[in-house]
Image (cartoon, rainbow, N blue to C red):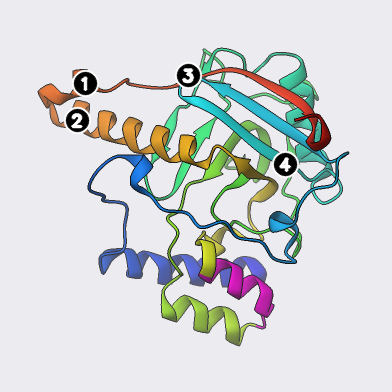
Amino acid sequence: MRKVFSLLLCCALCAALLCGCGGSKAGGGSDIRRKNYSSDELQFRKPADDTPVAVFDTTAGKIVAVLYPEQAPMACENFTALAQDGFYDGTAFHRADYGFCLQGGLNEAGGSTTKWNGSGYPAEVTDQLHHYSGALCAAMNADGEGGSVFYFMQTLPQPPADELVQMMTDAGWRTEVLDTYQAVGGAPYLDYTDTVFGQVIEGMDVVDDITYTQSAAEAAAASGSESAEEHPASFTINSVTITTYGEL
């Protein structure tokens, strides 16, 4: 039932995008104004000192994300093990879709793997974690399994379309979830299909800038524009360090 509802949400979202709330933008990624937001929702609470975090050192700056091993144990275990083994070091963000997501996690050959010798793991869904803007998520393959590929939700800080909110309300979604999506934006149609395993707590401006700049470069290259040379074709993850919130 949740997957069916997610498909309905996706259809409604596509209709809303066709009406003009897509990913076009004037100016650079740093023009986005994201408000500081806190609530009782897990992703917007202050973490305890022993909460694990991932620090992404990229060619555009630092991104810090809290991890949630209790809610998404396999996704966190896989990501942490690969990060500690240096799998992500020197890899590029291979997908930048402004207003939607920034994705990485493929090796130089364009492949995905796991700590379990490439064996995938199932989606881990919970009402405690949602695809709010800034969520760190595991991408599922065609078989519905996770691997090394991850993405940051780079959705813009705008509320879902009214029809989506009404559908979520009618389906009994918690008020706190509705309020948070209204406040920070996100992609509710991905809830209960993909895995959320973290949340950006520092460097969302870096996520925004990378996604905007790389999207613009890809669009310029596709159109044959001379401006393609003005932007880097991609950004690189220098390293991913796993530490704790108290050690930041």
The residue at 48%/76% (across/down) is 164
Could you tell which of marks 3 and 1 lies nearer the N-terminus? 3
Q: Which class describes the residues within 10 Å of circle 3: few (<14), some (14-19), or many (20+)?
A: some
How far apart marks 4 and 1 lie (CA) works out to 33 Å
Mark 1 falls on what kind of element? Answer: helix
Asked if residue 36 is among those painted magenta in the image, a careful observer would answer no
Q: Position of residue 40 (x, y in %)?
A: 75, 66
Residue 178 in the image: above or below residue 140: below
The residue at 39%/36% (across/down) is 209
Identify the image quadrant of residue 237. top right
Q: Which residues are magenta?
A: 172-182
Name the residue tied to disc 3: 59
Could you tell which of marks 2 and 1 lies nearer the N-terminus? 2
Could you tell which of marks 4 and 1 lies nearer the N-terminus? 4
How far apart marks 4 and 3 lie (CA) works out to 20 Å
Closest to the camera, between mark 2 and mark 1, is 1
Q: Which mark is residue 230?
A: 1
Closest to the camera, between mark 4 and mark 2, is 4
Name the residue tied to disc 2: 220
Name the residue tied to disc 4: 66
Can you see residue 207? yes
Could you tell which of marks 3 and 2 lies nearer the N-terminus? 3
Q: Check disc 3 and give the amino acid type.
A: Thr
Mark 3 falls on what kind of element? Answer: loop
Q: Are marks 2 and 1 in contact (CB under 8 Å)?
A: yes
